[in-house]
Image: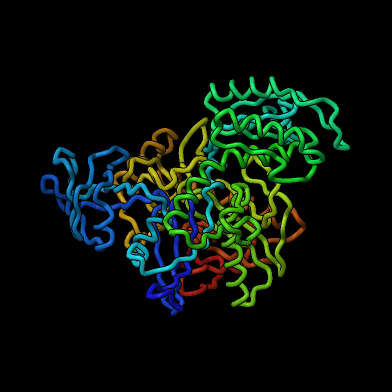
């Protein structure tokens, strides 16, 4: 079907912590697939250097047309600006760059990854020869929450409840631990505001407006970018929150969020945590979606939610996306499992920053709330357990032990082997152990950088055998994912050994056999572009 002379394209995009994957399907049935870094950087390996000209091998004509005017970086440092490009070379604005053959460089496009993917793989859109409708799933909010990266938020609660999100429900994460290490709060500042609404919805004490304005001025002075407002019993009567929002809107905050606009459910602590997380993530996710929507030139953008459904951009809240990327993966895993007759599956989606697991036994399990890291928010979601174990998880030696994550190198600077000056990650570990085929990886890899990063960790650990260090970090990540699977299976009375493990995501296959052995799982389905590969759990030993 055509719109004038323009072709209609349906685009599905999954933005992860490291890579963004896309599929393009025209109404005539043409299919295109593409992958870009989620940082929207283009990475090249230098073939030769001649003054300000860098030979970088084959570039598509489309790529060559995008890079002029973009910054060029090497190992995290800016080298200069690209002033011109051909299909084989980049021309810089300087010849004093110190680059040499074999160096890996990055061209920073400054776009959001889905926009870059559209420019690269659907150039007809820029020529106004295509009409696009996009479905977008992303772990951008999930990764930001796990890494505690977001807007600085002022949390405003009812007076006397300033420690609400420190005490929480008083559950101890490790019952027998002698030293309890609390996660630091997600907010930048917390304020108590006077005023009382009763449990029956009656105003007992009017809102202390002068205290509210005083707190707002202090929050602005301390650098807070957003306000999360949650007053007691506002679910029964939103009077105080509505009035507070009106006053705060005149104070100059860029982002205001009230609990009544997100949920009408009771449970003061979870309502406060819900609005706090939404306020923390909304500026990040909002600017991202705005940029993508602008590139679509007014055509439809639908965003996947944590429940596996799609909503219009205008109706989307940041908390709806906490497991939206994994939710799309679960839907795909179920469809693939049905092709093979599997009736009970455990899905494992391991990407660059996190690993997500879910259980399906013929019906979709929805939960009224979702937990990511230390935060629990009111948002309907598939029962997906998320842990900070991905290909980009930083591997180090600290406090007398090997550690993997929770911090991630992300798409920038990325793993050490990406040549951007990044730290040692699981991706580097697997590559150095010979588990990754460089020719099929999709981006150039720098073995010197990976070996140097591993050497520093080995030296810090005091261990002699670098392979034992690598195997130790792989085992840590494997056990973390196996524990996540126990959370959605054994903890709910289901024996994981009776299930089929469905593995997808860029790094899932590297840990699947170890996880299956840990849990007694015998059948594994590996999702691939051409369908499925079914095998026993000794697949890794057979290569």
Q: Nearer the viewer, residue 77 or 64?
A: 64
Image height of 62 relative to 471, above or below:
below
Asked if one can make out residue 184 in the rendered structure from this viewpoint, the answer is no
Outermost residue toward the right in this view: 200
* Residue 173: quadrant of the picture: top right
Q: Is residue 497 left or right of residue 401?
A: right
Pinpoint residue 443: horizontal percent, then vertical percent. 33, 56
The location of residue 492, given as percent across then percent down, is 76, 55
- Give the residue displayed 36% in from the left and 47% down from the top: 110
**What x and y, as percent, mark residue 251?**
58, 28
Residue sticking out furthest to the left? 50
Q: Is residue 5 above or below residue 388?
A: below
Q: Which residue sits at x=56%, y=55%? A: 313
Question: Could you tell me how many numbered marks the image carries?
Answer: 0
* In-image side of 137 versus 168 (left or right): left
Quadrant where the C terminus is found in the figure? bottom left
Q: Is residue 108 left or right of residue 539?
A: left
Residue 95 coordinates in the image, percent (x, y) = 13, 41
Q: Nearer the viewer, residue 330 or 216?
A: 216
Q: How is the image coloured?
A: rainbow
- In the foreground, 418 or 286: 286
Q: Residue at x 59, y 47 (%)?
A: 318
Could you tell me if residue 22 is visible in this image? yes
């Amino acid at each position: 079907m055509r719109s004038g002379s323009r072709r209609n394209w349906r685009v599905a995009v999954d933005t992860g912590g490291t890579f963004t994957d896309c599929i393009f399907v025209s109404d005539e049935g043409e299919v295109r697939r593409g992958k870009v870094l989620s940082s929207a950087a283009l990475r090249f390996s230098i073939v030769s250097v001649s003054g300000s000209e860098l030979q970088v091998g084959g570039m598509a004509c489309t790529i060559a047309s995008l890079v002029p005017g973009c910054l060029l970086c090497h190992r995290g440092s800016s080298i200069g600006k690209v002033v011109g490009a051909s299909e084989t070379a980049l021309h810089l604005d300087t010849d004093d760059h110190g680059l040499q053959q074999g160096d890996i460089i990055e061209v920073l496009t400054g776009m959001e990854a889905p926009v870059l993917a559209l420019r690269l793989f659907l150039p007809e859109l820029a020529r106004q020869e295509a009409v696009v409708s996009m479905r977008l799933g992303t772990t951008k909010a999930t990764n930001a929450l796990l890494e505690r990266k977001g807007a600085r938020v002022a949390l405003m609660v009812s007076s006397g409840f300033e420690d609400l999100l420190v005490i929480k429900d008083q559950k101890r994460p490790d019952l027998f631990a002698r030293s309890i290490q609390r996660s630091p709060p997600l907010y930048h500042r917390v304020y108590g505001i006077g005023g009382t609404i009763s449990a029956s919805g009656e105003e007992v004490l009017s809102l202390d407006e002068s205290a509210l304005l005083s707190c707002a001025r202090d929050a602005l002075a301390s650098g807070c970018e957003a306000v999360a407002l949650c007053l007691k019993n506002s679910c029964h009567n939103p009077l105080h929150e509505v009035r507070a929002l009106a006053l705060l809107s005149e104070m100059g905050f860029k982002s205001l969020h009230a609990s009544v606009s997100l949920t009408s459910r009771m449970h003061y602590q979870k309502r406060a945590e819900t609005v706090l997380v939404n306020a923390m993530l909304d500026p990040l996710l909002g600017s991202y979606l705005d940029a993508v929507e602008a590139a679509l030139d007014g055509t439809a953008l639908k965003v996947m939610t944590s429940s596996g459904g799609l909503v219009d951009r205008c109706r989307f809240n940041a908390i709806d996306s906490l497991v939206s990327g994994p939710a799309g993966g679960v839907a795909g895993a179920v469809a693939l499992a049905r092709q093979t007759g599997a009736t009970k599956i455990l899905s494992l989606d391991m990407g660059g920053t996190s690993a997500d697991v879910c259980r399906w036994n013929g019906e979709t399990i929805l939960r009224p709330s979702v937990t990511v890291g230390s935060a629990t928010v009111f948002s309907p979601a598939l029962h997906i357990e998320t842990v900070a174990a991905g290909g980009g998880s930083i591997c180090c030696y600290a406090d007398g032990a090997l550690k993997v994550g929770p911090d991630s190198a992300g798409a920038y600077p990325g793993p050490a082997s990406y040549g951007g000056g990044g730290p040692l990650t699981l991706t580097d570990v697997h590559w150095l152990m010979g588990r990754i085929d460089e020719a099929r990886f999709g981006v150039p890899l720098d073995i010197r950088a990976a070996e140097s990063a591993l050497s520093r960790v080995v030296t810090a650990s005091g261990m002699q055998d670098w392979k034992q260090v690598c195997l130790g970090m792989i085992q840590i990540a494997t056990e973390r994912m196996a524990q996540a699977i126990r959370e959605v299976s054994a903890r709910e009375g289901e024996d994981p050994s009776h299930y089929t493990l469905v593995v997808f995501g860029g790094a899932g296959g590297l840990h699947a056999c170890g996880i299956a052995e840990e849990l007694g799982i015998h059948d594994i389905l590996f999702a691939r572009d051409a369908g499925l590969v079914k095998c026993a759990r000794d697949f890794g030993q057979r290569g």
